[in-house]
Amino acid sequence: MRNAYIDQFPEEARVIRATLWSSFLALMIGGTLGLIQGLHRTNVLRFIPSQDYYTVLTAHGVLLVITFTIFFLVGIFTWAVTTSLDRGVKDIRFTWGWYAMMTLGTLLVGVSILGGVVDQIPMNADVLYTFYSPFQAHPAFYVGFVLFVVGTWLAGFDWFRTWWAWKKDNPDERIPLPTFMALTTMLFWYLSSIGVAISILAFLLPWSLGIIDSVNPLLTRTLFWFFGHPVVYFWLMPAYMLWYTMLPKLSGGKLFSDPLARVVFVLFLILSTPVGIHHQYLDPGIAEGFKFIAMTNTMFLLLPSLLTAFTVVASMEHGARQRGGEGYLSWLKALPWRDPAFTGMALAGLMFAAGGFSGMINAGLSINYLVHNSWWVVGHFHLTVGTAVALTFMAASYWFIPQLTGKEIWNRSLGLVQVVLWFIGMTFMSNAMHRAGLFGMPRRTAEPQYQGFSFDPAVGTVAEIDAQIALGAALLTLSVYLFITNMVLTTIGGSTSDAIPDNTYAGTLSGPEDSPAIIDNLKLWTSIAVVLVIIAYSLPLASIIDAGGLFGPGIDPWKPSVVVDPSLVLESVRGVMP
């Protein structure tokens, strides 16, 4: 007899379905916009004028790296907490409340971005995903973003109070691993999102409302990256949780080490936030010593990823050998490669390894200078959030949607084709982006070629690289639509069956009893994380404010500022140029 999630927690299942479908909708729209970008930049087919490219780029980034990923995260973490604690949320009305707040925030942000191309919408927010000054968005953009982030804070509080209720009934029990992963993720999210909250509420929103006349661009940029790199791990942590909890189960084995998994999430809690300045290596207003500290902190983040690779692969090998696999590598053939959930997550992990190698180059202080403002970074980004996260989430949906609907996947073979197609498309596109970055192709521009200058790649041609990018973008978009089709037809036309896999976790070869109880001391690890953040950011922020003030050099926000004619500034610049 089946033990689907919908049978155990019907009310929570409705909320999770809503979060996942919000995520899928953002994926479909954002993926379509990505195809428009890819075809435009490669000059294969242009649907929009170049001035609208930046609206499309902003919407693509916000919908995919914020909306798609975080809506999926809150749904999966709700599943993880309720199943591992074996109890529902404390108040389902509160749960619907944070979902409604996130949805309202998304709508405000989306409408304000659309104002860049729809004349009837009196808003504009072509500020890209990295929305620091000097770009200024309509106030609705900032209000929507605040609502969305506060919604995630409330979601985390929902999980914490569910755990507190469980802990009251089980005072001597260790925190179940999935709940431990959700709580540690939220703790570092609370810490890291302080930066973007201060940036918006103290500077960007008052600036866009006209309350203050000026902001310090370097300060808002630094506060953004205080949040901007940790948010990468906010996307990755649910993917890691799925690798730890689902891949061993789908492989037919057990998790190699519960203690190692806990250590990984503790390391992410401690190390994820004090690294954001490595996105600012090219900023002249930050001393090189502070950048070196950020680089060192970033290199330490390789450790939890390497531990994850070891633990997850060892768990998969154990499962394969339980299924009859033998030999040094031939055990790989015994894994369930016909299962789209397993294959998609396994391929996502493989692609993440490649993203880790390019990430080490991004983290290096001197090498980063060569690739920072190029398509190399975009290629890296698509390997991490674009594949490690996105492909894991899509693959996991082939297991979760039956659990949440009580229906079998409409077409599992189509699901297998879809995840493999994504892997192939991303291989073409990310490879070409990395190569383009190596010979200086710029990112974030509608027109990548400079007038009177042509790029000369060492291997291949620009036309061949453009063809790979366009082909990859087309395959990725096709993969998205195959995924959406399968999810829709499963929901509205899938057959109800008792063959749905049970909603349980794989066992462990080494359980929580094999690790010291201090690992579960969330107060201790959070305190250490706060201290590291203070060490990494107190002096750089003080230096930035000392040099440029809170609102710009010599700016008093409460006094009328002097308005300077831009033409006079241009003439003065021309006067000193040779």
Image: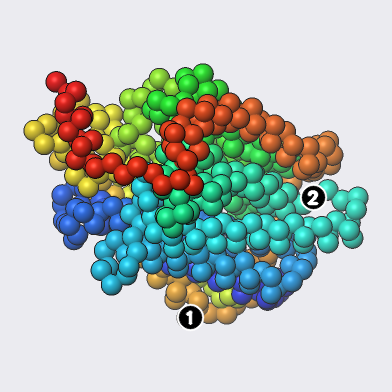
Quadrant showing the N terminus: bottom right
Give 431 or 440, whichever is nearer the viewer. Answer: 440
Near mark 2 (Cα within 10 A), the count class, few <14, some 14-19 or many ≥20, is many
Q: Is residue 31 above or below residue 557?
A: below
Considering depth in this image, is 144 or 198 the residue closer to the camera?
198
Which residue lies at the image location 19% right of the left edge and 23% below the top edge?
576
For label 2, the SS is loop
What residue did someone put label 1 on? 492
Nearer the viewer's eye, disc 1 or disc 2? Answer: 2
Provide the secondary structure element on which disc 1 rests.
helix
Q: Marks 1 and 2: CB-CB under 8 Å?
A: no
Residue 10, horizontal then vertical, whole percent: 68, 76
From the viewer's perspective, tell me whether residue 224 is left or right of residue 184: left
**Label disc, if present, on residue 175 of the rendered structure:** 2
Please identify the quarter of the rendering in which residue 84 is found. bottom right
Quick check: can you spot residue 340?
no
10 Å crowding of disc 1: few (<14), some (14-19), many (20+): few
Between discs 1 and 2, the one toward the N terminus: 2
Give whichever of 143, 210 is nearer the camera. 210
In the rendered image, which quarter contains the C terminus? top left
Residue type (three-letter) at the residue carrying disc 1: Ile
Image spot of residue 562 (x, y percent): 35, 42
Find residue 529 and report its image quarter. top right
Q: Is residue 410 above or below residue 449?
A: below
Q: Amino acid at mark 2?
A: Ile
Residue 55 in view: yes
Residue 406 image position (x, y, % from top left): 60, 75
Q: Residue furthest left?
A: 452
Q: How many discs mark residues in the rendered view?
A: 2
- The x, y position of residue 177, in whole percent, is 73, 49
